[in-house]
């Protein structure tokens, strides 16, 4: 079981709930990360930031696989459909 949390420094922390500790710190955003959402299939998640970028992460690789640019304001909510 894993929980992802965004931070004011732009990093994301992957928490291992069973161990009760941070399993990985992910970097990529340049500013506060305000939104995180798991993809319904559970293999990916998205993060949004004040830096106006939306990033897609691969949970297995523990890495960003795509960055979407074009928002004019920070991203505060993400919903997969």
Image: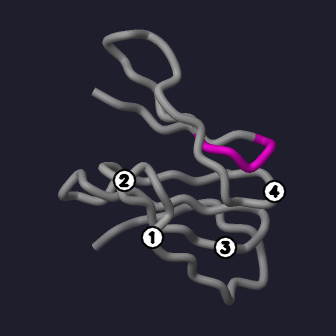
Judging from the image, the colouring scheme is one colour
Marks 4 and 2 close (CB-CB < 8 Å): no
Earlier sequence position, callout 3 versus callout 1: 3
Q: Percent x, y for residue 39?
A: 30, 59
Q: In 3D space, how far apart are the residues under numbered discs 1 and 4 (Cα atoms)? A: 19 Å
Q: In 3D space, how far apart are the residues under numbered discs 2 and 1 (Cα atoms)? A: 9 Å
Residue that label 3 marks: 53
Q: Percent x, y for residue 8?
A: 79, 42
Residue 10 lies left or right of residue 57; in this view the side is right
Q: Quadrant of the C terminus?
A: bottom left
Indicate whether 33 appears above or below 72: above
Q: In 3D space, how far apart are the residues under numbered discs 3 and 1 (Cα atoms)? A: 13 Å
- Label 1 crowd bin: few (<14), some (14–19), many (20+), radius 10 Å: few
Q: In 3D space, how far apart are the residues under numbered discs 4 and 2 (Cα atoms)? A: 23 Å
Residue that label 2 marks: 61
Q: Secondary structure at mark 2?
A: loop
Residue placed farthest to the front in the image?
Answer: 61
Residue that label 4 marks: 31
Q: Secondary structure at mark 4?
A: loop
Marks 1 and 4 close (CB-CB < 8 Å): no
Indicate whether 31 appears above or below 6: below
- Label 2 crowd bin: few (<14), some (14–19), many (20+), radius 10 Å: few
Part of the protein shown in magenta: 8-12
């Amino acid at each position: 079981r894993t929980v992802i949390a965004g931070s004011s420094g732009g990093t994301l922390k992957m928490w291992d709930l069973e161990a009760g500790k941070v399993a990985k710190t992910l970097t990529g955003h340049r500013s506060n990360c305000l939104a995180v959402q798991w993809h319904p299939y559970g293999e990916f998640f998205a993060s949004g930031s004040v830096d106006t970028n939306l990033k897609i992460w691969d949970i297995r690789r523990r890495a960003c696989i795509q960055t979407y640019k074009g928002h004019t304001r920070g991203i505060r909510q993400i919903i997969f459909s």
